[in-house]
Each structure stands twice: as structure tokens, then as C-alpha cells.
Image: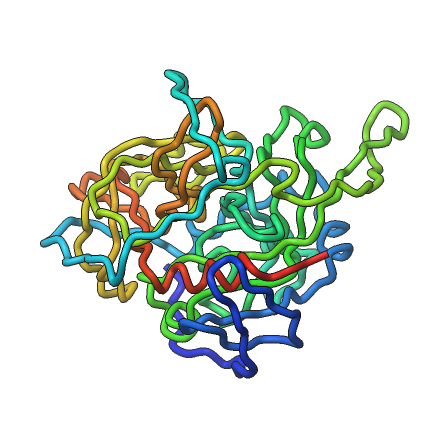
């Protein structure tokens, strides 16, 4: 396991003003702190640079990063006490602001969920060992430009820096051949990262969530040279939320609710078995309960449920009241840590930080930030 870093070396300056999802924030220069201990950081690359970096070949070669970070716990002790810190709140999904969803007996996969790709900071971006991925989802926001994921999927706890060349591809599918990978709704590069100070400074996994403002998307159009696709052209794709919608957001809810979890697992179980490839989206369903403390992650307020997904699913959403008919629900958690609770070298639970008012503060900072 890679040793965990101890402190942040990036100075935090400036301020951000946001009120719910109705206030408007203006772009600032670089890293800064916002309301509710929010760290805000501009993406290191321009949108065009980030999109041009990721060819289908590099996407195919990217590996899940959570496996290297070793985000897992073995054993299961006395559960911690996790309680709301205020009144429950709810923001509806995009398209459901004034409607009620119907009921479906099928589990249709959400269009909003996809894969996050990034390169490791401070390393040669042309080295395939630097090409990594996580999972994430589009979420409701004023400007329809926010992706929710894990904090360790935007900020590297090894180098104490935010990642480079960060992009999001909703409904990603890895084809049988490298050039058959699917980005049906486009590629959306990061413009601003929002994370909680306690993850950035202390690596406290009770705050392992982040919200990323993305720029308007691009589509890659393949061009064949002979019989093999070797070149791609980019065309504008529009805003993320306009193309796939966005999940609702809710916080300070019961610790015992039924949720769906979605993601792109690929890592091994502790016994070395790899049941997933990361090429397609997978899901779990179950009832959450408070989890035990895990000191190595400063983890005291996680909730979890039975799920065998492995590394690569990190950053994928937990959706409360998910309706297959509309493919929408309410973001109530994020895949963060895998658990081998019975010690048999197989992951059997997955946990998320409990979403409370501090989570909402980070979300609101992103939900009100405009991007082109």
C-alpha cells in the first residue's frame, strides 16, 4: 500500500460566496477556500488540452487508481455513531423539478454515470503508468455542469496535488477493439474542483467526496486511415446536464436507507480474483447501516451496505429513490472504501461518507459555479 501523505503543501487563499443552489459565483484565480471549509482549485489544463490528451487507446490502457491507494478495510468492529447535523434537504434531479417519476420493475442503468480519467500530477503524462480512472455521475446544478465523485478521484493523497488531464465520460463503454470505445454523450473536461478541506489537508475519508465543474463537452469522431481508425476530430457536444440530465442531491437523511450503487469496478479482491473488467457499468442494491471506525483513514462516519464491487468503482454514486423508468434518483453517497468484513479475502461491503450539511456546502459551491 502506498503510504498516506501527512499534510498539504498548496497554499489556500481567497474566498467563495455561494448560497444554496441559487447564488452565483465568479471564477477566481487558483486554489482558495470557500464556505463550509471548501477547497476550490482550477484544473491545471485547459479543456482543449485535457480532451486532446485522451485518445481511445489511452483510455483503454488506463488503470483504476484506488487499487494502488489501497482503499480497503479488513474486519468489522463496533459500528460508529453517525447522526445528521441539521434538517434533511433535497435538490431534485434535472428534469424532475416539478414532476414525479413512475415505477419500473427493471434496473435500467443511469445515463449520468460514467468513467473519470486523469493523469497523476508530477509524473510524465506520456507514461502509461500515469493513466488512471475512477467513476462519477452528473448531478443537478444551476448551470448543468457538475460531476460528483470521490475526493481521492480528484486529489492525490500521495503527491498532495489535484490530478491532471481530468475528464468525465458519461455512459462510457469499452469496446471489443480499442477504437470501439464509446463516449455516446461526449467528453467533459474539468474546469474547477471542489473538495472538503479535511480531505485535502488531513486525508479524512469522512469527507471523501468532491464536486467538479466541467466545461461544455466535445465528441470524438473517428477517421479511418486504411482499415484502422487512427485519427479523431473533435466537435462541440454542449452542456453535460443538457445531454444526460443530472441526479438529485440529498443530505442529512437516515443512515438506514435502500440505495443503488453504480460504478466501473476492475480491481482484484484481496485473494487476487478479478471478477470485473471495468469495461462496463455494474450496480449493487441494499440497505445502508453505520460502519465501524477505520483509524488508518480517519474514518468515523461512514455508512455502508453489502456489495462486492472492487477498485475502479470509487466515485460512483449511491442513489436513493432511484427510478429505472427515468434513470434518476437522489445522490446520497459515493463509493469510497471497500470492506472485507468477514476476513475471507473477498470484498463484501462498500462504504461512503455520510452526507450531511458539510457535504451540502461543498456541493453548493460547485452547483452555483458557471463554466463555458
The picture quadrant where one finds residue 41 is bottom right
The relative height of residue 49 versus residue 139 in the rendered view (above or below) is below
The picture quadrant where one finds residue 106 is top left
Residue at the image position 86 percent from the left and 31 percent from the top: 223
Between residue 209 and residue 319, name the one nearer to us.
Answer: 319
Between residue 298 and residue 126, name the one nearer to us.
Answer: 298
Q: On the rendered structure, is 197 left or right of 354?
A: right
Residue 251 pos. (x, y %): 33, 52
The relative height of residue 360 versus residue 242 in the rendered view (above or below) is below
Q: On the rendered structure, is 192 left or right of 226?
A: left
The relative height of residue 134 versus residue 306 in the rendered view (above or below) is below
Residue 34 pos. (x, y %): 49, 74
Looking at the rendered image, the quarter that the N terminus falls into is bottom left
Residue at the image position 46 percent from the left and 33 percent from the top: 328
Residue 61 pos. (x, y %): 62, 42
The picture quadrant where one finds residue 44 is bottom right
Residue at the image position 34 percent from the left and 32 percent from the top: 284
The relative height of residue 88 versus residue 31 in the rendered view (above or below) is above
Between residue 52 and residue 43, name the one nearer to us.
Answer: 43
Mark yes or no: residue 164 visible. no
Amino acid at each position: 500500500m502506498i503510504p498516506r501523505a501527512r499534510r498539504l503543501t498548496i497554499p489556500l487563499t481567497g474566498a467563495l460566496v455561494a448560497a444554496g443552489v441559487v447564488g452565483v459565483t465568479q471564477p477566481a484565480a487558483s486554489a482558495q477556500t470557500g464556505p463550509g471549509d471548501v477547497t476550490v482549485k482550477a484544473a491545471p489544463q485547459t479543456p482543449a488540452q485535457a480532451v486532446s490528451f485522451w485518445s481511445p487507446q489511452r483510455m483503454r490502457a488506463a488503470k483504476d487508481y484506488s487499487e494502488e491507494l489501497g482503499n480497503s478495510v479488513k474486519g468489522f468492529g463496533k459500528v460508529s455513531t453517525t447522526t445528521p447535523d441539521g434538517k434533511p434537504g433535497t435538490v431534485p434531479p434535472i428534469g424532475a423539478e416539478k414532476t414525479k417519476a413512475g415505477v419500473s420493475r427493471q434496473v435500467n442503468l443511469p445515463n449520468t454515470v460514467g468513467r473519470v480519467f486523469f493523469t497523476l500530477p508530477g509524473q510524465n503524462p506520456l507514461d502509461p503508468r500515469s493513466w488512471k480512472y475512477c467513476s462519477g455521475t452528473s448531478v443537478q446544478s444551476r448551470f448543468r455542469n457538475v460531476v460528483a465523485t470521490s475526493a481521492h478521484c480528484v486529489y492525490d493523497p500521495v503527491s498532495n496535488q489535484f490530478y491532471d488531464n481530468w475528464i468525465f465520460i458519461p455512459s462510457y463503454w469499452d469496446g471489443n477493439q480499442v477504437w470501439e470505445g464509446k463516449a455516446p454523450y461526449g467528453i467533459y473536461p474539468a474546469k474547477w474542483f471542489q473538495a472538503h478541506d479535511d480531505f485535502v489537508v488531513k486525508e479524512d475519508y469522512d469527507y471523501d467526496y468532491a464536486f467538479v465543474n466541467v466545461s461544455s463537452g466535445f465528441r470524438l469522431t473517428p477517421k479511418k486511415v486504411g482499415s484502422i481508425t487512427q485519427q479523431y476530430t473533435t466537435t462541440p457536444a454542449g452542456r453535460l446536464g443538457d445531454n444526460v440530465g443530472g441526479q438529485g442531491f440529498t443530505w442529512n437523511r437516515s443512515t438506514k436507507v435502500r440505495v443503488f450503487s453504480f460504478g466501473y469496478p476492475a480491481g482484484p479482491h484481496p485473494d487476487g480474483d478479478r471478477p470485473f473488467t471495468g469495461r462496463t457499468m455494474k450496480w449493487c442494491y441494499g440497505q445502508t447501516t453505520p460502519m465501524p471506525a477505520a483509524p488508518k483513514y480517519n474514518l468515523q462516519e461512514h455508512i455502508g451496505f453489502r456489495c462486492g464491487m472492487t477498485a475502479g468503482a470509487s466515485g460512483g454514486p449511491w442513489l436513493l429513490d432511484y427510478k429505472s423508468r427515468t434513470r434518476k434518483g437522489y445522490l446520497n453517497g459515493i463509493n469510497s472504501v471497500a470492506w472485507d468484513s468477514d476476513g475471507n479475502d473477498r470484498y463484501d461491503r462498500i462504504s461512503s461518507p455520510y452526507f450531511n450539511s458539510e457535504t451540502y456546502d461543498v456541493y453548493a459551491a460547485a452547483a452555483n459555479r458557471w463554466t463555458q
